[in-house]
Image (cartoon, rainbow, N blue to C red):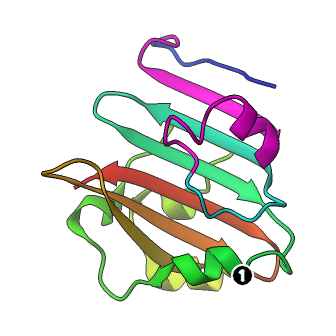
Amino acid sequence: MLACGFAEGCAENRDLFFSSLADATKAGESDRGWIPEYPPKTARAIHITEQLSPSKEWCGFEFLPNDSQNLRETLKRVDAFPSSVRRLPSPGATWWPAMLKGDLDVQRIHKDGFELYIVETPADSVSTWVNLFAIDWAKGRAYFYGTRE
């Protein structure tokens, strides 16, 4: 299932929902780079807001806690935030948590049961794609914000 909508329309921003990782993959979100390769196979209730210019992404999903090994092995615990993810813009979506808007309050995020992680990958020859993850391992909930640095 795919839904699209923002005041600007679908040309620049897209708001998507998929009931499973398989549905998101089938729709091409992995091929387009909006879904990384490492979410748990049980990822479900996947919300994605894509902003094409400048390129940014907000994603939230649920997963079975016992299906998180691949994700755990990929993530790097964060002690200091890269400059591109110290202050998170709002995607304007009701599903995105308030704790991940604006200046990040690590204590509040931890109090809400989430741990923070970073994954950095080359975007091109001169920039890096940075994903900041907030994950509640016990409840199987994850959010990530991605942008170029």
Which residue position holds label 1?
Answer: 69
Q: Of the residues shown, which amino acid type is indicated by label 1?
A: Gln
- Where residue 136 appears, as percent x and y from the top left, is 70, 76
Left-right relation of 121 to 16: left
Residue 65, picture quadrant: bottom right
Regarding residue 4, the answer to whether it shows in the image is: yes
- Where residue 87 appears, as percent x and y from the top left, is 32, 60
Task: Residue at 54%, 64% (x, y): give it.
Answer: 99
Q: Is residue 20 magenta?
A: yes
Left-right relation of 87 to 113: left
Question: In which quadrant will I find the C terminus?
Answer: bottom left
Nearest to the observer: residue 77 or residue 98: 77
User: What segment is highlighted magenta in the picture?
Assistant: 9-35
Task: Residue at 41%, 19% (x, y): give it.
Answer: 12
Q: Is residue 149 magenta?
A: no
Regarding residue 136, the answer to whether it shows in the image is: no
- Where residue 57 appears, as percent x and y from the top left, is 46, 43
Q: How busy is the neighbourhood of tag 1: few (under 14 within 10 Å), some, or many (20 plus)?
A: few
